[in-house]
Amino acid sequence: MRIVFAGTPGFAERSLAALLAAGHEVPLVLTQPDRPAGRGMRAAQSAVKQLAVRRGIPVFQPVSLRESASVEVVRSASPDVLVVAAYGMILPEALLGTAPLGALNIHASLLPRWRGAAPIQHALLAGDRETGVSIMRMDCGLDTGPVLARQPVTIAEDETAATLHEKLAALGAEMIVGALRELAAGRAVFTAQPAEGVTHAPKLGKREAHIDWRRPGAELARVVRAFDPAPGASTSIAGAPLKVWRARPAHGEGAPGEVLRADALGVLVACGADALELTELQRAGGRRLAAAEFLQGFPIASGTRLGMA
């Protein structure tokens, strides 16, 4: 098939690579404009753009898709179908109509659960035992279109956003190749999403990654896993920032944020209910360290309150 592909991060790059490996023709790639990144804040190309450049595929990076000129750029590529994965922009109706077979979206949840920009993180925050990938035909709603294929994935007890992302990216890449095979053969069956079970997954940021020690330890353990690798669950010690990369629910009583114990096993911190044992930490400007190594260079006394100036 002749495909215009729209995507930005590594999740989408896996699917673009799979489509190219399957022999599909990709005359145009849409991706987000280059953004400042890193300590030098230099303009960085998205993972999808890097792959497209290596393969000699023309790249289009509009700030908006609502101008008629943007729609014409896509239309001029004469796609059979559009494939979208974590693009980061809403496709207007005019653009959805540029391909005779419509637009397929690779979405990292079992729709209609977790419609929106951050389904992986929200699944972890909610304590879901299962998520997956859905291949959906796009319409003008937010992830509301009919579903062609869906496949579940079990969420492990120690799953992080990083590990779950890799699982779902690989699965999505495999599924979109199969979905296009069914579409080309005329065997594709699209099923409307049920009205029940709809949840939303809006974009998350540093504010949501802040650890509120008044919450139960089990909830905070999910916060730590949901924000690994970015932006990292955060608290403070003596007014200085502290990232928490690994933690597990534990038993303990004390004032929220109070350090109950700090030794080679971890830093046990009281929460609104029970406690949280921190096993991997990072100070500003430092490296991620296991608790035992962290405490060698930065001892923490029992009674210290985290999250306070």
Image (spheres, rainbow, N blue to C red):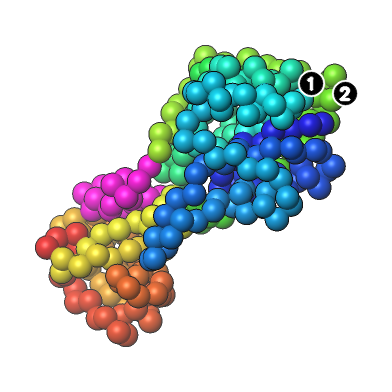
Q: Quadrant of the N terminus?
A: top right
Q: Which residue is mark 2?
A: 185
> Residue 28: image x %, image y %?
69, 37
Q: Residues within 10 Å of mark 2 (few under 14, many from 20)?
A: few
| Residue at the farthest left position | 309
- Say what secondary structure mark 2 lies in: loop
Q: Residue at x 85, y 42 (%)?
A: 23
Residue 214 forms part of the magenta stretch = yes
Q: How many marks?
A: 2
* Residue 122 place in picture, x, y as percent: 44, 39
Image position of 185 (left or right of 238): right
Relative to 33, residue 45 above or below: below
Mark 1 Cα shell of 10 Å, populated few (<14), some (14-19), many (≥20): some
299 drawn magenta = no
- Give the farthest residue toward the front: 69
The amino acid beneath tag 1 is Ala
Q: Which residue is mark 1?
A: 188
Compared to residue 251, the image places residue 19 above or below, namely: above
Residue at point 42% right, 55% down? 36
Asked if the residue at tag 2 contacts the one at tag 1, i.e. Cβ–Cβ closer than 8 Å, the answer is yes
> Which image quadrant is residue 136 in?
top right
Highlighted range, magenta: 204-224
Give coordinates of residue 192: x percent, y percent: 63, 15
Q: Residue furthest bottom?
A: 296
- The percent position of residue 220, horizontal first and vertical second, equals 34, 51
- The alpha-carbon separation of the residues under discs 1 and 2 comes to 8 Å
Say which residue appears at 81% left-offset and 38% top-offset.
Answer: 24
Residue nearer the viewer, 18 or 45: 45
**Image position of 86 (left or right of 223):** right
